[in-house]
Amino acid sequence: MSRRGFWIVILAIAFACVGLAIFRGAGCAGSHEMDAAQPSSSTAASVAPTFAPTIENSGRPAGSTPEGMVWIPGGEFSMGAQDPPDINDEVGMNATKDSRPIHRVYVDGFWMDKTDVTNREFSEFVKATRYVTVAERTPKAEDFPGAPPENLVAGSVVFHPPGHSVLLNDYYQWWTYVHGANWRHPEGPKNSLRGREHFPVVQVAYEDAIAFAKWAGKRLPTEAEWEFAARGGLSGKPFVWGDQFRPGGKWMANTYQGRFPVKDSGDDGHVGISQVGLYPPNGYGLYDMAGDVWQWVSDWYRPDYYERFAATNSVVRNPLGPMSSFDPDEPDQPKRVMRGGSFLCTDQYCSRYMVGTRGKGEVSTGTNHLGFRCVEGVPHP
């Protein structure tokens, strides 16, 4: 659910609200053109209808490893999600048609943060720059004509379990616009970051993530870079760690147990968000590439993007995403892709902790289950 969407409901403005960033996200109507990274004509290979092996680049750049980052070799891989497994739902894997067909992609090597950006790191950025996040800014009266001044209060969107069984067709039952919710107070003004210095920063809109990345001399990953890194050298596996959700009975990510959205039983050791780096890393040494919090990537969202690549029958090199976003369900708001799922993902409602699946979020919206991590490219000689 978007920040603006809640204001639309609160102020009774007569147009559709923005959908939930993960489950019902939308994008603005835009061009149907591809981005500048067109399919390579020099790499003659057929698009794989199923997963083919990952072909990693050899070597790595000279010099020391940037602090807190790991080298991702890049190379050619099969991008996209598996066909739906035996999961009895209509909004999990069975609703991920936008992550198909599987197609071959090449990405150059790059450095990537080992973990999501933490509250401590974001605090350093804010202290150095005096940056004010979107959720901390008071809504402007001109953006909401006719709104009572007392309703123009800064805030953001927070998950609140309803406390009783509900149908899963109305996410207003578990998402609430909370005055005073922001990165410093992820669940609202009574909540603080004390003891959460090493938790992922959340309640960050897309422009907040971009601002941090620029300050740090980095950038957000493209969707293709993110998926190559998440797979950790594996090909066609449903999870970033392999074939089984709980290999040997071991929890591998912070996800939702219990009855969604009523009660997270915390069987994995956590109710809600958890500290970064508590679960085993993937094959490239990256932590939390599934579950805990969603991660912004730089691509605009549109559901037909993969179909366009597959139709070229070529390996796509370093794709940057489409030139604009579009979601036929809600065509009026700009959306960027998000990856990895969160602590709210469950096979009862959203199984997008499965690698290759896609989320989408309205760019001005942060929530208490959405963060980011950064990458750093290597200059070409």
Image (cartoon, grey):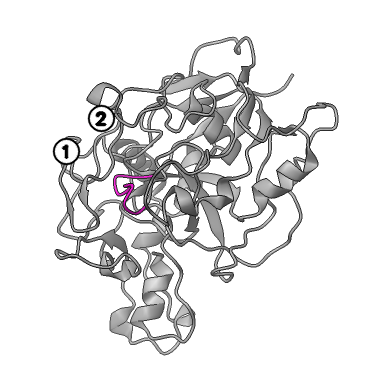
State the SS at label 1: loop
Determine the residue positioned at 53% across, 29% down.
236
Pointer 2: what residue? 251
Mark 1–mark 2 distance (CA, rounded to whole Å): 9 Å
Main SS category, magenta section:
loop
The stretch in magenta equals 341-349
Pointer 1: what residue? 267
Q: Taking the image as drawn, is residue 217 in sight?
A: no
Q: Taking the image as drawn, is residue 150 in sight?
A: yes
Q: Is residue 59 left or right of residue 116?
A: right
State the SS at label 2: loop
Which quadrant of the view contains residue 371? top left
Amino acid type at mark 1 = Asp
Between 2 and 327, the residue placed more toward the observer is 327
Q: Which mark is residue 75?
A: none
Residue 284 x/y as whole percent: 46, 19
